[in-house]
Image (tube, rainbow, N blue to C red):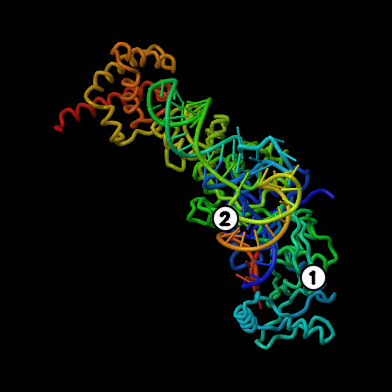
Amino acid sequence: MSIRTRFAPSPTGFLHIGGARTALFCWLYARRHLGRFILRIEDTDRARSTDDAVQAILDGMAWLGLDHDEGPFYQTQRFERYAEVRDQLLSAGHAYRCYCTKEALDAMRAEQMANKQKPRYDGRCRKLTEAAGGAGGSDAPRRDGTAPVVRFKTPTTGQTIVDDAVRGRVVFENAELDDLIIARSDGTPTYNFTVVVDDHDMQVTDVIRGDDHLNNTPRQINIFKALGAEPPRYAHLPMILGPDGAKLSKRHGAVSVMEYRNDGFLPEALLNYLVRLGWSHGDQEVFSREEMVALFDISDVNQSASAINPEKLLWLNQHYIKAADPDDLAAELGWHFERLGIDVADGPALADVVRCQQARAKTMVEMAENSRFFYEAFAGYDEKAAAKHLGADATPVLMRLRDALEGLATWDVTAVHGAVNGVAEALELKLGKVAQPLRVAVAFGPVSPPIDQTLALLGRETTLARIDRALEYRDAESVAPT
RNA sequence: GCUCCCUUCGUCUAGCGGCCUAGGACAUCGCCCUCUCACGGCGAGAACAGGGGUUCGAGUCCCCUAGGGAGCGCCA
């Protein structure tokens, strides 16, 4: 049978980084084995599920390029099917109705806790129905007037074995498990039940999910068995922690995938970072999408939780920025400029800006911020830079530069380079003494791409205007008493 | 409390009994390159949680301890 995996998020928030990693591994495994990748939305908790969250999950996966072959399937649209299987279990004697009230259950749990026991359902209604002939009880209302819930009859003896693809063999004593609720008193199905029905109906061969589900697995396997079905293979992935080793949360900064785009990350960088969290292929650090697919092996997934390392993500992002096609990056840079409210219509071509900034930005946000001087004049100079480079001795340098640049026959990198170096030689100054004042004059701060490239992109008109402006600033400064 | 899982540099990890004087990457710190900022190049420091076994030999296998995590819902 060909491989079928699924990613089954519940739409209660955004697609967060841990979910994205799970989705990636499921996707990788399916692609690697030429199988199918199914997307299933687990929205049975209607109070907490939202359409916005569904959209956020779809957007996040699309941005990362994790395309699904089937779905999205919505559990809320399958209630009839769950009811059907529930009844099947009921009539086969694998499930029974439970008339215990919430209060009674709470009291039972409290008592068990007080006795230092594991809180679990003691099966009192199971004994009831078994004594009555095992019919599973009727739908008669309970003492509190509500309908009964339906519980699954978990085997009371023996063991359930999970042969996990990453954890190895994990053995659970059935006696440790209790009779879980598969249908609530309002008739809606619960998680452990819907998962089994869906994984079965959708013919999922490999369940790859977070290891917070490892403890649920024996319950699910038992339901599979009661249904007379073969359980899928399981692979439980280690958790992803925040940089400080604590559980990942909002206070760790970006947790939602789309926030990473806003912060200037490239999807290939995030994907590459994520694939190396809990998985490795020898010493290799950089993987293209194709390489990941070709090399991914579930048995290379490791078993311990890993902490997110923002610096390494940044490094990968810079790596992918450096390696990217300038024309592709131009579009992304344009998107970020738009977010910053900067109009790029009158400035240099975005792809040209990308070419000279690629090696000097760790994120696209940083690139946009360091490039805004190409498109808009700032209100003032960087204070420290102006004090250092636009002092009294800058005036003759700037005037000389202005003349040389104005007289240039052509305006390109080579010509500008010659002019600037010519001024430095004529004044017997080191290049830095000439380039820095010029840089502050045109870029308003101490940092820019190489000065010749910067001027070439800026154009003669803007360059000369900004030099004039710096000269005026100098005049004003020299009048003002210090 | 009970059940289950985990434990190699600060972090991500390689290691599947001898190749380990424990390798790589990020970060950090030096040096070089240099018109700024970067890129790049070279180099340095930095780890097998602890204790018992098994074995000629253990980071690698077993047990215990400690520490961390997850689950124990009419949440998923």
Q: Which residue is mark 2?
A: A14
Give the x, y percent position of residue A308. 55, 48
Q: Residue furthest left?
A: A481
Give the x, y percent position of residue B34. 41, 20
Q: Residue at x 70, y 64 (%)?
A: A216
Left or right: residue A190 compared with residue A469: right
Which element carries disc 2, helix, strand or loop? loop
Q: Is residue A287 above or below residue A83?
A: above
For residue A12, what is the image quadrant? Answer: bottom right
Left or right: residue A386 compared with residue B55: left
The foreground one among A72 and A323 is A323
For residue A280, what is the image quadrant? Answer: top right
The residue carrying pointer 2 sits among few (fewer than 14), some (14 to 19) or many (20 or more) residues within 10 Å by Cα, namely: many
Q: Amino acid at mark 1?
A: Glu
Which element carries disc 1, helix, strand or loop? helix
Do residues under tags 1 and 2 come within 8 Å of each other at their CB atoms?
no
The foreground one among A80 and A308 is A308
Q: Residue at x 36, y 22 (%)?
A: A461
Asked if residue A281 shows in the view, the reply is yes
The label on residue A84 is 1
The foreground one among B11 and A336 is B11
